Image: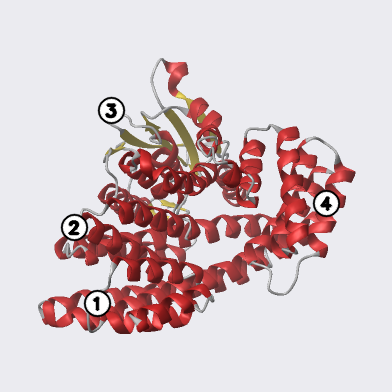
Amino acid sequence: MNAQNNVEELFTNEDYAKVIEILTAKESNEPLTLRDYFLLTKSYGRNKQYANGLIYSNEMIGKSLEGKDTTNLVKAFNLKAENLIDSGGYKSGVIFCEQSSRVFREQDSIEFQKLCFKWGMMYYHTGEFQNAYDTYNKITLPKYRDLSLFTNNYALTLMGLEKWDEALFYFKKSIAKYKSKGNTEKLNVNYSNVSIVYMNQGKWAESKVYLDSAASVLYNDSSLRAQKGIYTNYFKLYQIQGKYDKASHYLELISEVNEDIYRKKINEEIDALETSNRREDHLREKVRASDRQILWGTIVSLLALIGFISTIFYFKYKNVKSAHEKSVTEQQLLRSQMTPHFIFNSLSVIQGMVLNKEDKKAVKYLSKFSKLLRLILESSREKLVAVKEELLALQSYVELQNLSRLQPFEYKVEIDDSVNEEDILIPPMLIQPFIENAIEHGFKERIDDPKIKIHLTAQNNVLVCTIKDNGIGLNATKNITKSHKNSLATKITSERLKMLSKDFKIESNLILEDREKYNEKGTQVTLMIPYKI
């Protein structure tokens, strides 16, 4: 009992590292209580070790279900939601909150309203602003609605709905609270957000005043994302006003911060994997040693491969930047957001399979994942690859996506006789972004019998690639997501095609259409790609 009191005292005093040390040592000798799981999960989250926080929140959920302890179960749901949003798992977080919210009873009202804080912000980050607005309005307790966390996040949601005046009201309310508490980090974020509101209202002078205020309270320990947010807003402000020299300066700063974020995320994931390895050592006696050695050997090899790919990407970016400064910087920005997100999500899926003892499924997933990474690595070394290799990488990407989806989709490739797959050479990774858009946005809502079809034909030294899906359609996707990443991916692909046209002296084109114009459902993308033999 004294030891438990000591842990509680350490947690109250915010000595989270010590709490983790004591409770992980305890776990080696005796089972943890549900209170231990709560303190351990919370401490990992406060120490920004979100992957470990997810591991223990899942274990707390399992223990609560075993003991039919609904009170601790809803607390565990909140802990998992907290770690999901902090680790950037917004899409899986939305699904988790939608499913777990059905478990809450009337007497769990306070815990449910706590969940709505995380749930609403997950909707916000996935661009579902109306759902975020409706979720935040489920928070009815006056003491909760008066919290800075509520006023700040509610203002962000209002901004997403373009209710600018209401958003200003709540942002300024948050600023007053943070000023009174001397919370500098939160203060600069809110100044930056107010500048965005004024920017959207066309009030450039007011926007600049608040943006300068945000920059003035930045300090050395400010979060990288706070710095990136302010630099991004300066870039947008100067770009809109046509001050391209200043805009270019901030674009370079954004690129530098993105690299720091990327490296930091890699280090966090490595730390989490090392912690998982230590826990596996304790459990190794209970499983067959040979199976575990093979599985962890594969994971270590995969981690080394990821590190090698990351190094290749970094140096490739440095070399290309000097030749194509602006266009390549924007392309690297998009890649530095997409690649880590894809890798970490895949690692989380693998980790979940390992912990659930789904060894065969984990090995199958690892095999396909390592195959895809190897193909990406090989293609990244070349400016041009054979159509056959590009289609093989696409096939691996699609298979990997289908393994982790609740509703798999049908994928079909039709190749005209005019296309020699082994002799025709095209730039790599031109088609993949549009397959990803079809999966993430075309099939955002549940679709009966989802399908993606690719048709390839060659004419006049141009490879014509038509990508069709039967999703919600281009018009609906634009209205729902308002995704900057989609438009940036399309813009970058267009720029790459223009460069190909100049190099090959052959016309290229990119056409995006809603299949509604052909009395069909979904989106159609037509890529006209110059090629070499």
Q: Earlier in the sequence, mark 2 or mark 1?
A: 2
- Which residue matches tag 2? 66
Residue type indicated by callout 1: Trp
Residue 19 vertical position relative to residue 111 in the rendered view, above or below: below
Q: Nearer the viewer, mark 3 or mark 4?
A: 4
The residue carrying mark 4 is 210
Q: Quadrant of residue 416?
A: top left
Residue 513 x/y as whole percent: 50, 27
Secondary structure under tag 1 reads: helix
Q: Is residue 512 visible?
A: yes
Circle 2 Cα neighbour tier, 10 Å, few/some/many (<14 / 14–19 / ≥20): few
| Residues marked 4 and 1 touching at CB (< 8 Å) | no
For the residues bearing labels 3 and 1, Cβ distance under 8 angstroms: no
Picture quarter containing residue 334? bottom right
Mark positioned earlier in the residue sequence (3 or 4): 4
Left or right position of 445 against 121: left
Name the one closer to the observer, 264 or 527: 264
Q: CA distance from mark 2 to mark 1?
A: 29 Å
State the CA–CA distance, disc 3 to disc 1.
Answer: 38 Å
Which mark identifies residue 296?
1
Front: mark 2 or 3: 2
Tag shown at residue 448: 3
**CA neighbours of label 4 inside 10 A, class few (<14), some (14 to 19), many (20+):** many
Q: Amino acid at mark 2?
A: Glu
